[in-house]
Amino acid sequence: MMTRQPIVVSHFQVEPLLAARRRGDKLVLTSLDLGLSQTEVHLEADRVVFPDGQWLPWATIDEIAANGTACFLVADNTASKIQAYSEEFGRFYSLMPTATAPTVLISGILMHRIKRVDPIEDTRWKIRAIAPITDRVLDTATGLGYTAIAAAKTADQVVTIELDPTVQDLARLNPWSRDLFENPKIERLYGDAFDVIQNFPENAFARIIHDPPTFTLAGHLYSTDFYRRLYRVLKRGGRLFHYIGDPQSPSGRRTTQGVIRRLQEAGFAQVSSYLPANGVIVRK
Ligand SMILES: C[S@@+](CC[C@H](N)C(=O)[O-])C[C@H]1O[C@@H](n2cnc3c(N)ncnc32)[C@H](O)[C@@H]1O
C-alpha cells in the first residue's frame, strides 16, 4: 500500500499559487514535495485546498512566500517551519530551501554549498572525486543523506554515521532524503564517527566519504587520530574524499594545509586537492 507523503513546501512552491490567484485561475500545478513532483492544487476565494483535503488560508501562503530561508510542513491545516533544537548537542537545525534540494543550517552554518552549485551538484562533485564508487562505502557524516544516497546508486553497501538523531528527524521530513530511509543498501548508524569507526574491522571499506561539519563544530574529525582510524578501515588501493571548505578563503586555505599534513602523518601516501568539490582526495 502506498503511504501518503507529507506536504512540504517553501516559497518556491507557493509562488505559482499566488501568480495563479492573480490570474484568477482555480486550479494550478505546483510541487508539494519541494520540487520533486507536480500536483494539482485547488484555489478558492479564502484558501488553497490540497489533494488530501487539507487546506491553508491565503494569509499562511503569503507568510510562506515571504520566508526565503524556511521549508514548511503542512499538517492539520497548519504550516510549521521544519526546524528543531537539539537539547543534547545545543544545536539548532533548520531545513533551508534552494531551487532544487534543500540544505540544513546547523546553528547558522550551511551543510552544503549553495553558491554557484546547488546541494545536488555539490554532492555529485563529492562522489565524482572518488568514482567509480563500488564495493562497501563508509559515509562518516550522514546529514540529509545526499552523499549516502548518491553512493548507494553504484555501491554494494553504504554505512553512514550521524551524531545527532535530531538531524535525522529533519531528514525524515525532507522528500529529497527519502532513499536514506528506503534504500536497503544504506545502513544508518548513530554516534560520534570518531568512536563508531572503531567497531569496523580493518580494510572494511573501498571508499570513504568524509563530509564533516566545519572545523569549529567537530575539530576531532580533522585530527591525526581520526585520520589514523580512517586509514585502518580503508582497503589497500581504496580512496577517501575529505570535504574541507572553500580553499580560496584564508581559513579554508589554512585548514586544507593542516588536513593534508595530518593525513600524511596518519599514513596516507597520495594526498591531492580536489578543487571542484572543495576537498582533498586520498589513496591508501
Ligand atoms: C556537512 S553535514 C553532512 C552532509 C551529508 N554528507 C549530506 O550529503 O547531506 C555534517 C553532518 O555531520 C553530523 N556530525 C557532526 N558531528 C559528527 C560526528 N562527530 N560524527 C558523525 N556525524 C557528525 C552533523 O550533525 C551533520 O548532520
Image (cartoon, helix red, strand yellow):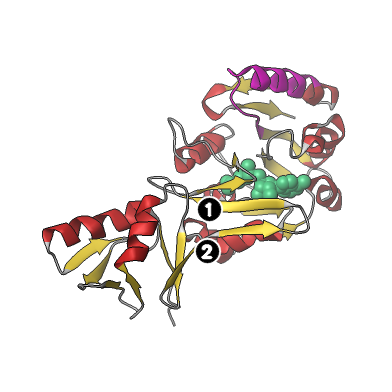
| Residue 101 x/y as whole percent | 44, 49
Q: Which residues are magenta?
A: 241-261
Residue 265 seen by the camera: yes
- Name which residue lies at 80% across and 50% down: 192
| Magenta stretch contains residue 250 | yes
Sequence order check, earlier mark of 2 and 1: 1
The three-letter code of the residue at mark 2 reads Leu
- Name which residue lies at 24% across and 58% down: 18
Q: Quadrant of residue 255?
A: top right
Q: Nearer the viewer, residue 215 or 87?
A: 87
Rendered-image quadrant of the C terminus: top right
Circle 2 residue: 173
Q: Indicate whether 283 appears above or below 19.
A: above
Q: How far apart in space, not on screen, are marks 2 and 1 (Cα)?
A: 9 Å
Left/right placement of residue 16 relative to residue 195 reads left
Q: Quadrant of residue 254?
A: top right
The three-letter code of the residue at mark 1 reads Leu
Q: Nearer the viewer, residue 176 or 16?
A: 16
Left/right placement of residue 192 relative to residue 247 reads right
**Label 2 with label 1: CB-CB less than 8 Å:** yes
| Magenta stretch contains residue 229 | no
Left/right placement of residue 51 relative to residue 172 reads left
| Residue 162 x/y as whole percent | 70, 53
Q: Nearer the viewer, residue 145 or 254?
A: 254
Circle 1 residue: 95
| Residue 110 x/y as whole percent | 57, 40
